[in-house]
Image (cartoon, rainbow, N blue to C red):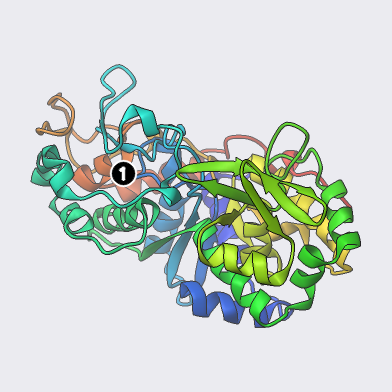
Amino acid sequence: MSSVFSHHLDLRKRLLARAEDGAAYREIVREIVGLRAGDIVSTAEHLAPFNVADSVSFVLPQMAIATIRPVAELRAIRILGGALVPLDNRQYPRGFFRPGDVVSRKRHNLFPQALRKASSLLLPPVSLGDHPDLEALFEEHGYLRPCFAGSEVQTYAHQMASVMEAIARSWRIGDDDARLDLRVTPLESAAARMLVALIEIGDRALWRLLFEPEVRARLRAGLHGVLCAWGDDHGSFLFWGVEGRRLVRLEERGGALEGGSLRIALTPEDIGCSLRCGRIWPGVYLSLLALSYLPNLAVSGGRKQDHYYRRMIVVTNAVLGLERPQDLSLVGYMTIDPCMFPAKDPVAGSAFGDAKTGGEGGSLRPFGTGLDLARRGLNLPAAVKIMRSTAIARDIGATIPDYS
């Protein structure tokens, strides 16, 4: 079983690999989301301010390795974060967890309880005027103020992406406080733009999947029952519909997608128009197809994603006659518990943080982990030593199925 350090070093090399096939699609991704040749991509995280420790379980090991073993071609970590999960998802997009442990966990909510099942991509950005008590947070984390002061972003999801970037920029890694560029984009928003671009140019692969009934039927049958695709009682076929601030499950009936009061013909005109106006959003399958499968771009996720995405790759290969590799899906998330990592500075109290406990350094907090890192930094030498001596959380190789 490999160590966390060796696993993440190998993971980086595999994420940086770029095959010739898919280059034209990657060029479109570059234009849409600014993806560069030296960026590595994670699709495991949701758009929440690093509220829980496992939300930094990919980012921290990669940042640590980049700091001690610089790789010239590595420019940034790009998070394509899920924005259609409900606000009360365990990573808690609804607001901020204050740094602390399970017992002392406290939170600051940016939306009321009535909207806990809404998705960040369907909500407007939050303004400071609506939440004057955010000043307590800004006393210690002033770098977050611009994210809430007259923000011109489209949605709360885009606002939360800027919050995550600001938090990550504040992390102090090692003795020289080295930092690594981390950029965050809502996954489904980027995928929607990619799909519109492909529809407009008449891309053959996407055209067949969406608009040829026989091919679409084979895809629907092949992914029926697969996690994060669709089934009799879960998911939504290809897209999610939107009614107000609520996601609506869609099913195909008579050449159209139907759900709630929505009926959208499966034609290039109707699908393209509905994507542009936010009437539909791509589900996980189409998001990964647009940003990973077609561009032949490996992404890092968790074990659940590894299973369902590999199945999606195999089915799509069979339907389209392509040969995309299953290792476009790689496991980098939750290979270590970040609470094993030591902070640089002692625990300190604040108006927004936990009570002062004294002591030198101490481990990272399980809740409010991103803010805790911003406040205390990471003891890089100790963290690297832990990564070198700690086996990955489970034998990843034994969990990866071969769907060939």
Q: Quadrant of residue 328?
A: bottom right
Q: Amino acid at mark 1?
A: Gly
Q: Nearer the viewer, residue 120 or 319?
A: 120
Q: Residue at x 59, y 68 (%)?
A: 273
Residue 220 against residue 357 in the figure, above or below: below
Left or right of 171? Residue 133 is: left
**From this viewpoint, which residue is outermost toward the front?**
261
Residue highlighted by disc 1: 370
Residue 297 shows up from this direction: no
Mark 1 Cα-neighbour bin, 10 Å: few <14, some 14–19, many ≥20: many
The x and y percentages for residue 87 are: 42, 37
Q: Nearer the viewer, residue 186 or 45?
A: 186
Residue 27 against residue 341 in the figure, above or below: below
Image quarter where the N terminus lies is top right
Q: Residue at x 59, y 42 (%)?
A: 248
Q: Residue at x 54, y 43 (%)?
A: 247
Residue 159 against residue 267 in the figure, above or below: above
Q: Nearer the viewer, residue 393 or 221?
A: 221
Left or right of 17? Residue 34 is: left
The x and y percentages for residue 278 are: 51, 59
Residue 305 shows up from this direction: yes
Q: Nearer the viewer, residue 297 or 201?
A: 201
How many marks on residues?
1
The x and y percentages for residue 246 are: 50, 41
